[in-house]
Amino acid sequence: MTYSPGPQRLTPEARRVLQAIHDLSEERGVPPTLREVTEATGRRAWSTVAYHVATLQRLGLVCSYPGQPRGTYLTDAGRAEVTGAPTIDDAARHLRAARAILHGLDAERIDRPFAWAVQALHDIAAGLEGEH
């Protein structure tokens, strides 16, 4: 199961750029420059990498800070895309969807243990929503 904005929207080249940003950030402890990402992906033109970075920004997987020479940061969603780990927002979204499904079930036919699970799910989702 994928928790990010959608791997189906990433081309293999954009995925390679995302992976390079992650790897270089982890390796060096600072976000990479476009030139470093260009070299890491084996591209010749940094403009191609800049195009993919713009796509990744639009999808919320990376963010940039204007005026910063090392301004391409992975977001939580970008890190989740690379590592496969869900973010809090993803967990909250999935809990809300599960709660909606469970809430739509016939309350008269739900036994007590199941009703407890529905309430617990509601409490967890409410707590996650309160953190944001």
Image (tube, helix red, strand yellow):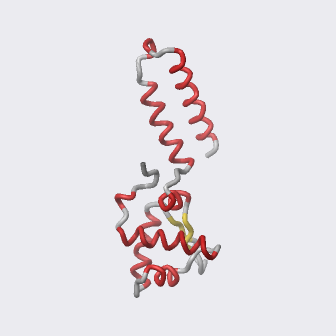
Looking at the image, is 77 positioned above or below residue 64? above
Q: Position of residue 19 (x, y in %)?
A: 48, 69
Image quarter for residue 46?
bottom left
Q: Position of residue 23 (x, y in %)?
A: 54, 71
Looking at the image, is 96 positioned above or below residue 51? above
Q: Position of residue 76 (x, y in %)?
A: 55, 58
Q: Seen from this angle, which residue lies furthest top?
A: 108
Residue positioned 60% across, 74% down in the render: 27
Residue positioned 49% across, 73% down in the render: 20
Image quarter for residue 51?
bottom left
On the picture, is 130 further left or further right than 60? Answer: right
Looking at the image, is 126 positioned above or below residue 131? above
Looking at the image, is 49 positioned above or below residue 104? below
Marks counted in the figure total 0
Residue positioned 47% across, 66% down in the render: 57
* Residue nearest the observer in this picture, 103 or 115: 115
Q: Position of residue 94 (x, y in %)?
A: 48, 40
